[in-house]
Amino acid sequence: MLIPVTFVITYFFSGCNANDAKKSEAKEVTLALEHKPTPFFSSDVSDYYTAIVLNQCMEGLVTLDPKDLTIKPQLAERWQISADKKVYTFTLRKGVYFHEHELFETEEARLLTTADVQASVRFACSKSSNDEGSNAYHLIFKESLEGATEYFEGKAKDITGLSVDKHKVTFKLIHEDPNFLYKLSHVSASINAIEALKSKKLIIGTGPFVFDQYNADSTSLHLMKNTAYYEKDKQGNVLPYLDGITFLFGLNKTDQLAAFNQQQTDMIIGLPPRKITEMLEGKIKDFNSIPPKLIMKDNPLLRTNYYFFNMLDPRFKDPRVRQAFNLAVDKDKIGLDVLKNQYNELGIFGITPPVKRVLKGYDFESIKQHGYQYNPALAQQLLREAGFPNGEGFGNVTLRIGIHEIHEKVAEEFVRQIASNLNINVNIDASSFGIKESDANFGRGDIFASSWTADYLTPETFLMNFYGKTVPVNANKPSFINQARYINPVFDELFSKGHLEQKTTDALTYFNMAEQELMKNPPIIPMWYSGEIQIIYSYLRNLHFNALGYFQFKSVQKEPLTKEEFTKQQNSNR
């Protein structure tokens, strides 16, 4: 999921030496994230935290509307789809420039062209130094774009399904893909300048914000306004409205809440469980005043928190062992005592979170039939049948987690329950997000805590993490996509059929069957599906919360809300 980076890069742009006094007067937004982004190529981005940051700087041909998650034009002003739905032709906007950087020798060199698009796709479909493909290759182009696989494998000098002509870029697909536009909206499909690709300094985009100065060891990162941004609002005002964005990293939820209450940050995503009642009841006047000082939303997310087994471990080869671990976990207790009811659903379904209003037509009930309710007696029976009566001879298990307040508390309860119900000792090994993900890629651990947020609105984005054909043949090679190294021919066949199916309803049927198979022979323990309490100060306008946790700040304003405006909004919503 996340490619480890151990080097430090600093980017300097014109205008980054603005003095502190000017910044303090500027209209800026500050928010906290649990983990730092990693300064690697945009085509490799697969983690949520890096995506939030880079989505403000990098742009693709299309984008998501954060209000309703529909596809909107971005670097392409329009597109056409052929009658057979396999050829997409995009017409680029004119007059779009990449951010200023010393790489560009002239102003004209910064101008976006179809050559930049073509080079970006070729780069995404090229082998990296470790012979693994980028996230963009696996997520978007592999087995979809004609000639992408041959180009990646070195069997062709170019991608036959990619062509350019003046201001137009054409993608020819092998088969119809109803999610192709959604995939192109992902940050890994961002367009980079040819100069940036050559130098491998890829945090140079066309977006509304520019990297000011970033050091990978820092606890914060500042983005400044792109004063030459091309987009305007409906009234003709140049975007973005904000002068900058500051991201704070490494604060646990308790510290994030303290910073929010002191107005050092403008929003908080998720509350520390122990502080929920205190926050909601203690701030009741701030929520109910007219206009309110604080605005809250309880937002169901397309995000699954789960544990996965390292399938290289011989003990987990037997599905009965993995089923026993699933049955030994009392998720109701975790939800009530640890999460304090701050979740959308508990993990009694599969890997796909049951947000039915978004994933319409997906049969969650059939998956639930193969899910795992708490049943310690059956868990002990299965473990005994697998040759480990009362946990004898199983040995210790290492649970790898990232340093995170909530996940640490959940892990502690998981350890207690496994010891009580299976008589197996689980040791917690907590490390930074980057180190944990690197070790997961290489299988350095027994069980790993993980979470996955949808890249687009289909179960495919969750199920692809267990597609066996992404697992390297050499066990010593990292497995970036399928970290569990789960190989199940039945699942693979059903998933592939769903991926290739042209009719959406039939594709959902195949994905549903694949997920049922996944849960019969589980490489995972679904723990809970996120539903976060999100709170902002009311002066933060046009910030939309959605099921993908996707934030776009180019239209966000920082202006006090008046009583008259609030009353008008309330009346219009009735």
Image: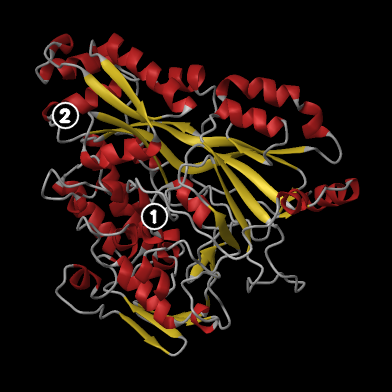
Please state the horizontal and vertical placement of residue 521, each as a whole percent of the image. Answer: 20, 35
Q: Residues within 10 Å of mark 1 (few under 14, many from 20)?
A: some
Residue 61 placement, left or right of 366:
right
Place residue 118 in its image quadrant. bottom left
Asked if residue 436 lies left or right of residue 316, the reply is right
Q: CA distance from mark 2 to mark 1?
A: 33 Å
In the image, is 319 to the left or to the right of 303?
A: left
Mark 2 falls on what kind of element?
helix
Residue underneath mark 2: 316
CB-based contact (under 8 Å), mark 2 and mark 1: no
Secondary element type, mark 1: loop
Residue occupying the far bottom of the picture: 166
Above or below, 475 against 312 in this view is: below
Q: Amino acid at mark 2?
A: Phe
Q: Would you name the residue on which mark 1 appears?
A: 40
Mark 1 is on which residue type? Phe
Where 4 falls versus 17 (above or below)? above
Q: Position of residue 542 (x, y in %)?
A: 70, 54
Image position, residue 43 (x, y; %): 37, 61
When the figure is inspected, residue 332 is found, relative to residue 209, above or below; the finding is above
Front-most of residues 362 and 67: 67
Residue 209, quarter of picture: bottom right
Q: How many marks?
A: 2
- At horizontal 84% and vertical 34% (from top left) the residue drawn is 289
Q: How is the image coloured?
A: secondary structure
Q: Is residue 538 above or below residue 331?
A: below
- Using the image as rendered, state which of residue 432 and residue 159 is in the foreground: 432
Mark sitting on residue 157: none
Residue 544 seen in the current view: no
Residue 183: percent from the left, percent from the top?
41, 62
Q: Earlier in the sequence, mark 2 or mark 1?
A: 1
Label 2 vs label 1, nearer the camera: 1
